[in-house]
């Protein structure tokens, strides 16, 4: 979705991957924002934090920004929400492979090593879990419990569909392509440009393996620019 929105608007879209590839200074800002929403919920502070982080971005996707759709919709009353949905078991498999393996998963060691080599600060782990708890509106998530995660995923989709006006919400399924997205956003379909299929599970697993092989995300970007 990030690449699709950037193609449509010719402006950057904020994705969690931004933090991995150069904006790690945003981690404490996002954490302050999470903490503010979970405690005093001062609208002035929330507005200021979001504006500071997302200045120059035309759209947001992924964690941690998905946890703040309510606040972003209040700040931007004409903004629209694209809810990307997929088969729940596919979502869980992708989550386990590229976001958060189970604690006892044999691949977790390689996963953590790839994060270390990519220069991902340890503070990212807390931001990730805290923002997911906020997005799912459930503080006691057991992230090793697949059934609980699937329940949270389905409830999150239902909550968005119940609370966002239909005129501001598009339920976009993998494979829908340009037409429904561009119609919803009132823009022309990009001419002669295939709908992006970046960040597929196989690509993300390949990226993890390449980071482990080459020792840094910068070296991967130099040797394999097409995968970034």
Image (cartoon, rainbow, N blue to C red):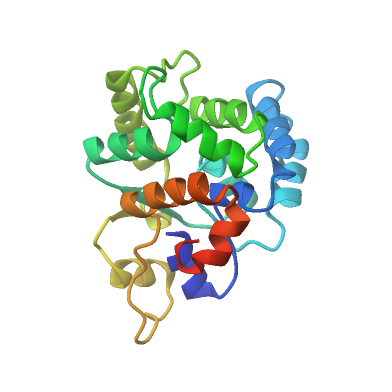
Of residues 36 and 13, the one drawn nearer to the viewer in this rendering: 13
Quadrant into which the N terminus falls: bottom left
- The quadrant in which residue 95 appears is top left
The residue under the point 40% across, 50% down is 204
- Which residue is situated farthest in the front direction here? 213
Decide: is 223 above or below 60.
Answer: below
The residue under the point 36% across, 24% down is 106
Residue 120 left/right relative to 144: right
Decide: is 224 above or below 206.
Answer: below
Residue 126 left/right relative to 53: left
- The quadrant in which residue 186 appears is bottom left
In the rendered picture of this protein, how many numbered marks are placed on residues?
0
Decide: is 82 above or below 148.
Answer: below
The residue under the point 39% across, 57% down is 167
Decide: is 78 above or below 165.
Answer: below
Provide residue 108's location: percent of width, then percent of height.
43, 27
Provide residue 223's location: percent of width, then percent of height.
53, 65
Q: Residue 44: in sight, yes or no?
A: yes
Provide residue 207's location: percent of width, then percent of height.
44, 51
The residue under the point 62% across, 33% down is 124
- The quadrant in which residue 142 appears is top left
Of residues 201 and 167, the one drawn nearer to the viewer in this rendering: 201
Of residues 38 and 212, the one drawn nearer to the viewer in this rendering: 212
Provide residue 83's location: percent of width, then percent of height.
37, 49
Of residues 139 and 219, the one drawn nearer to the viewer in this rendering: 219
Q: Residue 67: in sight, yes or no?
A: no
């Amino acid at each position: 979705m990030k690449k699709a929105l950037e193609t449509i608007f010719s402006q950057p879209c904020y994705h969690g991957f931004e933090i991995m590839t150069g904006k790690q200074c945003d981690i404490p800002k996002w954490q302050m924002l999470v903490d503010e929403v979970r405690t005093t919920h001062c609208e002035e502070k929330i507005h200021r934090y979001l504006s500071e982080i997302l200045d120059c971005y035309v759209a947001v996707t992924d964690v941690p920004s998905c946890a703040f759709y309510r606040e972003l919709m209040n700040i931007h009353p004409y903004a629209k929400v694209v809810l990307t949905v997929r088969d729940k078991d596919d979502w869980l498999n992708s989550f386990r492979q590229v976001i958060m393996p189970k604690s006892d998963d044999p691949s977790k060691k390689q996963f953590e090593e790839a994060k270390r080599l990519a220069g991902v600060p340890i503070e990212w782990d807390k931001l990730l879990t805290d923002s997911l708890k906020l997005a799912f509106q459930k503080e006691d998530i057991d992230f090793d419990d697949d059934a609980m995660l699937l329940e949270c995923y389905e409830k999150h989709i239902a909550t968005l569909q119940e609370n966002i006006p239909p005129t501001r919400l598009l339920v976009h399924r993998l494979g829908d392509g340009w037409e429904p997205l561009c119609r919803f956003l009132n823009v022309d379909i990009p001419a002669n440009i295939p709908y992006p299929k970046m960040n597929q599970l196989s690509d993300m697993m390949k990226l993890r393996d390449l980071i482990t092989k080459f020792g840094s995300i910068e070296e991967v970007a130099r040797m394999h620019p097409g995968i970034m």
